[in-house]
Image: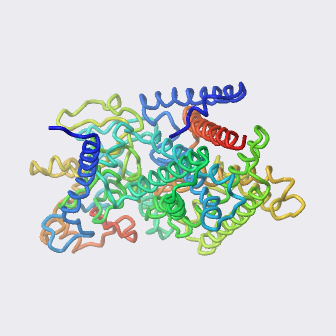
Amino acid sequence: MKITRKDFLRLSGLSLLAAGCKPAVRSANQPASGTGAAPTQLTRWGMVIDLRKCREKDGCNACVHACNAAHNVPQIANRAHEVKWLWTEPYATVFPSAQTGYAPQTVTETMVPLLCNHCADPPCTRVCPTQATWKRDDGIVMMDWHRCIGCRYCVAACPYGSRSFNFEDPRPSIASINPDFPTRTKGVVEKCNFCEERLTRGLKPACVDACPQHVFAFGNLADPDSEPRQLLRDRFAVQREPELGTGPSVFYLV
Amino acid sequence: MLMLDKALKGSRRYWMWLLCLFCIIAAGLCFYLRQLDQGLGITGLGRDVSWGLYIAQFTFFVGVAASAVMVVLPYYLHREKQFARITILGEFLAIASVIMCILFIFVDLGQPARVLNIILYPSPRSLMFWDMLSLSGYLLLNAIIAFVTLRVEREEAAAPRWIKPLAILSIPWAISIHTVTAFLYSGLAGRSFWLTAILAPRFLASAFSSGPALLILLCLALRKLSAYDVGKDAIRKLAIIMTYAMAINVFFVLVEVFTVFYAAIPEHTMHFEYLYLLGGGHNLAPWMWVSAVFAVAALVILFTPAWRRTQLPLACILVFISLWLEKGLGLIVGGFEPSPLGAIAHYAPTLPEWTIVAGIWAVGAFLITVFYKIVLSVREEVDS
C-alpha cells in the first residue's frame, strides 16, 4: 500500500484531532453533578461537635493525636509549613461573627476542633484545574494526591483554611509511620478525608472514637433518625460561615 | 520562518548584554533546581500566604501582555499610521510577556512534572482552565501575526489577507486574558479583598498604563541604542493612552477604598489596613505608600504641559514601578493577609524566590532583545 505525504499528514492530523476530542466527549457523557444536597441523596456524612462537652476537658487533644497517627500527618516545627487535618483554634477566632464582646473569657478562649467542612457546594473542588479534588456522592470531599499539581488554587478558595500544602517532604517529620495509610510527597495539597478509609470498613472516624468526652457525633445527615440529626433537632447549632453558601457538613453545638 | 539568523549577527555590546542575561537566567535556574529538590519551602510562602511573588508577577505580566492591544487596536482598527513602526514591537512584547507568565505559573507549581494534568483532565469549572486557554491562544495569535507580518515585510510583499482578521481577533482576546486572570481571584467567596466586581476593570486599567509605560521606555532605549525610531507621534499617542489609563486606575482604587471604608465591614477593611497602615509592623506598608506617591507624581507630570514631554521617561518609570508594587506584590499578598482565621504571616520573599523571579525577568529581556534585534535587522535590510 502506498501512502503519499499528503495522505499521511491528513491522517495524522485527524488522529490528533480525535485524540484531542476524547476528553471532551467523555466529560460530555458524564452526568453533571448537581450543586447542593439533593433531597433524594441517600447518604451525606456529617458531624456534630458538642463544644460544651469539649470545654469540660479543654486542651486534651486526643482527637488531634488520633487523626495525626491514623493519617501520617507530619509534625512540622515551622508554623508556615504545618500540615493540619484536625486541629484547634480559640472559639473567638473560629466564629468571629458570633462574638458579642461580653462572653466570658472561658468561652471565647476555649479551643474548638477544626477540620474540613465537607461542604455541600465546595469552593475548592470548583476551582481545581485537574479534578484532583472532588465531592463524592456521600458528601465527602476527596483528594487525589497523585493527580494534584500543587497549584494551591484550592488553598486560596477554601474559606476555612482547611487545606494544607506540603512545602517540604513530610516523611522525615512523621514520628511513626502507619503502614495502612499512604504518606504524601512534597508539593501536593492534603486535608481531612472524614476517615473515608475507616468508613469503608464500617468504622467511625478516628477522632470520634478517640474522644474521651464523646464530643463528636458522626452519621448520615440524610437519615432523620441518625445521631447528628437528633442532636440538630434538639439543640441550637452553628456552622462556620454558612453565609458563604458552602453548606458545611460540620456543625457545632455551642 | 522565525528569521533567527538575524539574531546571530550583532555587535560586541549585543553579545555582552545577552551573556549578562544568560548569567541571571543560569542563577535563577540553579535556585529553581534547588526548589525542585527541596520543595516550595525554600520560598517565603506558607500555609497562610500560599501565593506570593510568583503569582503576583504572573498577574502583572498578563497585564503587560494584554496591553499590546493599545497599539494593535489603533493600528488595525482605526488605521492610525503613526503606529506602523511600533505595533510589531508591542506584539513581540506581548509574546515575551506571555512566555514569562507561563514560566511564573510553572515555577509556582508544587508538582511541575504533572502540569499536563490540566489538559488531560480538563475542568471547565475552574478559571485556571480558561486562563490556560486564553493565554495560549493569545500567545499563538501574536506569534503568528508578528512573524508573518515581519516575513512579508522582508520579502516586500503584501500581507496575506487573513492577517487582519487575526489582528482584529487579538483585540477582544487581549481583553479576555486579563479579565479571566482577574476572575481567578474575584470569584473566591472566602477572600473578601478580591471579591469585588471592579477587580477586572482595575486590572485592565493598570495593564493599559503599565504596558505602554514599558513599551515607551523600550522604544526610547531603541532610539538611543540603534537608529530605529518609532516616531514622535507614536510615543506621544501612547503616552496619552498611558496617562488616561493610569488616571482611571487611580480612580478605580479610590472607588474601592470608599466602598470598603465607608461600609466599614471588618472583613473588607482589614486587608487595606494591612497593606496601608504604617507603623503596624507590616513590611509591605511602606512599599504600598511608595506605589501611591509614585502614582500621584506620575499623574502630576503627565498632566502638566511643561513636563509632559521633557519628563516622559521619568513618568513612565514612576508608572511602571507604582503599578509593579501595587499589582506585582500587594494585590496578591494583600488577599492572604490577614488569613480567614485572622492570622498575619508576614510574608517576605526569600533570596531563592527573588533569584528565580530575576531569572524569569531575564528570560523576558532575552526574548525581547532577540525579537527586537530581528525586527530591526529586517527593517534595516528593507530600508537599504
As displayed, is residue B69 above or below residue B106? below
Q: Is residue A13 visible?
A: yes
Report the front residue among B75 and A32: B75
- Which residue is at the far left? A202
Q: Please tell me which residue lies in front, B309 or B351.
A: B309
Colour scheme in use: rainbow
**Residue B276 position in % (x across, y down):** 67, 57
Instruction: Report the quarter where the N terminus of chain A lies.
Output: top left
Between residue B12 and residue B289, name the one nearer to us: B12
Q: Is residue B165 above or below residue B358?
A: below
State left or right for residue B353 relative to residue B114. Answer: right
Residue B253 relative to residue A100: left or right: right
Q: Position of residue B317 (x, y in %)?
A: 75, 49
Vertically, is B378 above or below A160? above
Residue B174 in view, yes or no: no
Q: Tell me what residue is drawn at x 80 percent, y 57 percent.
A: B297
Residue A228 rendering spot, x and y as whole percentages: 20, 65
Q: Quadrant of residue B200?
A: bottom right
A215 or B138: nearer the viewer: B138
Q: Residue at x 57, y 34 (%)?
A: B359
Image x and y of residue B104, in percent: 50, 43
Left or right placement of residue A243 versus residue B6 in this view = left
- Pick the quarter of the image with the C terminus of chain A: bottom left
- Count of numbered marks: 0
